[in-house]
Image (cartoon, rainbow, N blue to C red):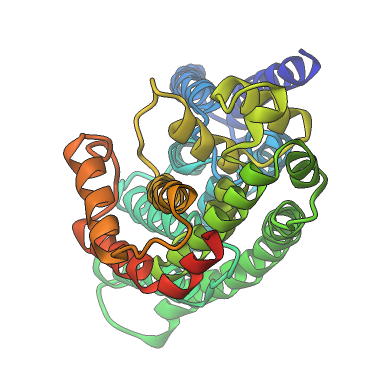
Amino acid sequence: MKENKLFRLQEAAIIFFTIIVSGVASWLYGKNVYEIVKMIILIMIACGCMFFLIEVSRQKQLFLYDNAENFHRFTFFYLFFLIAVAVLPLLPEGGWPYLVIFVSLMLFSDQLIGMCAGSTLLLMTFMLSGCESTDIFIIYFLCGVTGGIMFSYLTESFKVGLPLLISLLMQFLGLCIHEVLMVNESLHIQMFVIPLGNIMICLILLMIVLRYFSFTVINKTRDIYMDINDPECPLLVKLKEHSKEEYYHAIHTAYLCDRIAKKLGLNDAVAKAGGYYHKIGILKGESSWENAKEILEENQYPEMVLNILKEFLDKQEKIVLKETVVLLMADTVISSISYLFSKDSTAKIDYEKLVQAVFKKKTEGGLLNSSSISIGELEEMKKILTEEKLYYDFLR
């Protein structure tokens, strides 16, 4: 309840200060009454869209990383950039570092919120500057959105080189086109000074933001998964004490989830955690989504783990995430082999036929109709599971 109230206060602060700053800045820049009213009305509309997107993301759990639980980071960056917006019109049009603004706001919320928030600030700067051409708005918007989307898919590997290069190159080319084709009539070296200066400033600021992002999000998440994916983690120890059979089932499932996810380039830490904790609900009686949710929320487990287990355990949920598909197939294969060995520990199993049968049943049953998994990835998954013949002997 307290967290929900704090979230609401931050939403209110964002909207309130955006409207106030836009009105005050318009007055300070000598805008007439008509222009001030126009600015406030447009900003209010933009704030309404931003508020709606924040609420949708909160309710539908669309925030990237752990941003839902740490919305203060977005609030801080947004309010900081809001103050900076009042100064940006004093700079040349080609010197606005909007690539940094869009990337930062997307990293600490999600793609749609970051896009809407960045566009709101860009609109304010555009109107305060008195710029008559919409070309500069379009250039900053397209470069900002593209850069923000590329950076918003960072994983624990934190490979920022390519997104950084492409984003900066796009902004440089966009600003050069603006200078050469839309502002200057003749080509000379001076027209590249402002775009180059913009790129250098964006590079420095992006490195600072990414450093902070790595420290507060990437490294933090990596440490959490190292703890919860330890077989001696307190919750897994409790599971072992409650039922050794379910504990070892979880261990074997997690192993396969980890192998498959790494091979397919998925989030292996999340997939492995799904394998470890998909049976955790039995600590409260049965392996249901309600029990698993209660246990994992009490222990403050990452949102992504809960999302996967909800899709896996809740029969009303559609399976969308690829990591959930990995968990589904790994669990079914382990369960099938364990069942056959429980009947006859010396049984000779044709693992290839068993895996084929499992995939045929799950795909023909329509369970994967809403999933983003591709046919190629499913085939690769079959191959990996079939090749684990030696490992399956541990299930005897």
Q: Nearer the viewer, residue 90 or 273?
A: 273
Q: Is residue 206 visible?
A: yes
**Image vertical order of residue 295 relative to residue 37, above or below:** below
Horizontal and vertical percent for residue 29?
A: 60, 36
Q: State how many labels appear.
A: 0
Instruction: Name, please, the residue furthest toward the bottom.
Output: 189
Q: Nearer the viewer, residue 336 or 154?
A: 336
Q: Quadrant of residue 17?
A: top right
Question: Residue at the spot x=44%, y=53% of the render?
Answer: 344
Horizontal and vertical percent for residue 171?
A: 41, 67
Q: Is residue 84 visible?
A: no
Question: Residue at the spot x=62%, y=55% of the render?
Answer: 251
Horizontal and vertical percent for residue 230?
A: 74, 58
**Image vertical order of residue 296 relative to residue 65, above or below:** above
**Image vertical order of residue 349 relative to residue 234, above or below:** below
**Image vertical order of residue 269 relative to residue 363, above or below:** below
Q: Quadrant of the N terminus?
A: top right
Question: Residue at the spot x=36%, y=53% of the render?
Answer: 136
Left or right: 339 as drawn, with respect to 20:
left
Left or right: 310 as drawn, with respect to 237:
left
Instruction: Name, please, the residue furthest toward the left.
Output: 364
Left or right: 235 as drawn, with respect to 378:
right
Q: Nearer the viewer, residue 126 or 216?
A: 216
Horizontal and vertical percent for residue 59?
A: 53, 21
